[in-house]
Image (tube, rainbow, N blue to C red):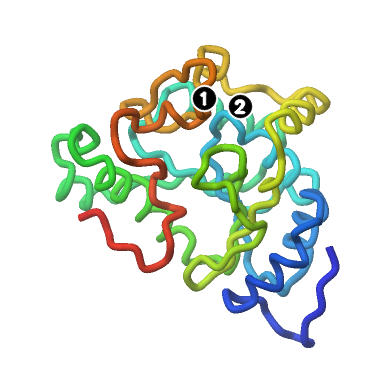
């Protein structure tokens, strides 16, 4: 994916529109290579949940640079299968800089001392266990790569491949991939699946707030079932009000 820039210029949120236009028809491989290979994108990290669809993006990244920082937020409420998968997949792909991010213990003691906030305030739980820890970890970076896809939910149907995300850029190389494309790539590359996918979990978050999905349901229907909530908050528009 070729782009034009002034000598020495670094891309920023103000460039998101024309970068998105240039990236609209670029392949995931080309976009990832451009982001990881061009200093104009600044310091770049990949953010991964090591969930049901994480392997393909991480495999594409590893083919370009297995030493790129990968940020993984261990909320303290993840399935034990996810923790094991994070270790196993990282080793399988040869990722050399996977950073496990944890919530701040003082913040947890202050707002979720009993560990039950998920049961009555899932937004607040996500805020303290995922959103704030990731925001802190991202301060060291200028751009980050996400694995979101348009087919995952109606709220993602118009997802651009490059977005402004506060003071940095967010890149979605797989935005236009279908479930079939992901499956084909995973099969071709013999990527190990998340063990919970075969048990009926096509989208996997924290254990208390993730249920199995029935045939015909939205792949993310099992996330925060029964709540008017579709996102954890890390992809909320900049300036959104905190949950607590």
Q: In this view, does 80 lie to the left or right of 15?
A: left
Of all residues, the one furthest to the top in this rendering is: 199
Which residue in the protein does label 1 denote?
84
Name the residue: 45% across, 58% down: 137
Q: Residue 201, how many percent across, how many down?
A: 50, 21
Q: Residue 87, how many percent across, how many down?
A: 56, 30
- Which disc number belongs to residue 112? none
Quadrant for residue 78, please give it: top left
Distance from disc 2 to disc 1, alpha carbons, whole Å, reads 6 Å
Q: In this view, does 208 lie to the left or right of 30?
A: left
In the rendered view of the protein, which quadrant contains the N terminus?
bottom right
Label 2: element kind: helix
Above or below: residue 226 compared with residue 196: below
Front-most of residues 170 and 112: 170
Q: In this view, does 1 lie to the left or right of 239?
A: right
Which residue in the protein does label 2 denote?
88
Label 1: element kind: helix
Name the residue: 76% across, 51% down: 65
Name the residue: 51% across, 24% down: 84
Above or below: residue 198 compared with residue 241: above
Above or below: residue 218 compared with residue 36: above
Q: Decide: few, some or many residues near mark 1? Use Cα within 10 Å; few <14, some 14-19, many ≥20.
A: few
Decide: marks 2, 1 in contact (CB < 8 A)?
Answer: yes
Name the residue: 80% across, 44% down: 63
Q: Residue 216, how many percent across, how many down?
A: 54, 20
In the rendered view of the protein, which quadrant contains the C terminus?
bottom left
Front-most of residues 44 and 126: 126
């Amino acid at each position: 994916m070729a782009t034009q820039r002034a000598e020495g210029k670094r891309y920023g949120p103000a460039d998101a529109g024309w970068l998105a236009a240039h990236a609209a028809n670029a392949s995931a491989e080309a976009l990832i290579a451009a982001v990881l290979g061009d200093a104009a994108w600044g310091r770049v990290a990949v953010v991964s949940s090591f969930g049901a669809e994480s392997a393909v993006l991480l495999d594409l990244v590893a083919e370009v640079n297995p030493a790129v920082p990968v940020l993984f937020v261990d909320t303290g409420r993840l399935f034990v299968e996810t923790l094991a998968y994070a270790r196993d997949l990282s080793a399988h792909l040869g990722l050399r800089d996977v950073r496990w991010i944890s919530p701040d213990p003082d913040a947890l003691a202050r707002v979720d001392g009993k560990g039950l906030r998920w049961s009555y305030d899932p937004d607040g739980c996500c805020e303290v266990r995922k959103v704030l820890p990731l925001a802190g970890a991202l301060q060291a970076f200028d751009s980050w790569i996400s694995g979101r896809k348009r087919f995952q939910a109606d709220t993602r149907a118009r997802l651009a491949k490059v977005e402004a995300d506060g003071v940095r850029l967010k890149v979605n190389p797989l935005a236009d991939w279908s479930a079939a494309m992901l499956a084909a790539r995973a099969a071709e590359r013999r990527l190990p699946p998340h063990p919970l996918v075969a048990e009926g979990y096509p989208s996997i978050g924290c254990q208390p707030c993730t249920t199995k999905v029935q045939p015909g349901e939205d792949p993310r229907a099992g996330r925060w079932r029964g709540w008017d909530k579709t996102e954890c908050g890390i992809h909320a528009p900049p300036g959104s009000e905190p949950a607590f």
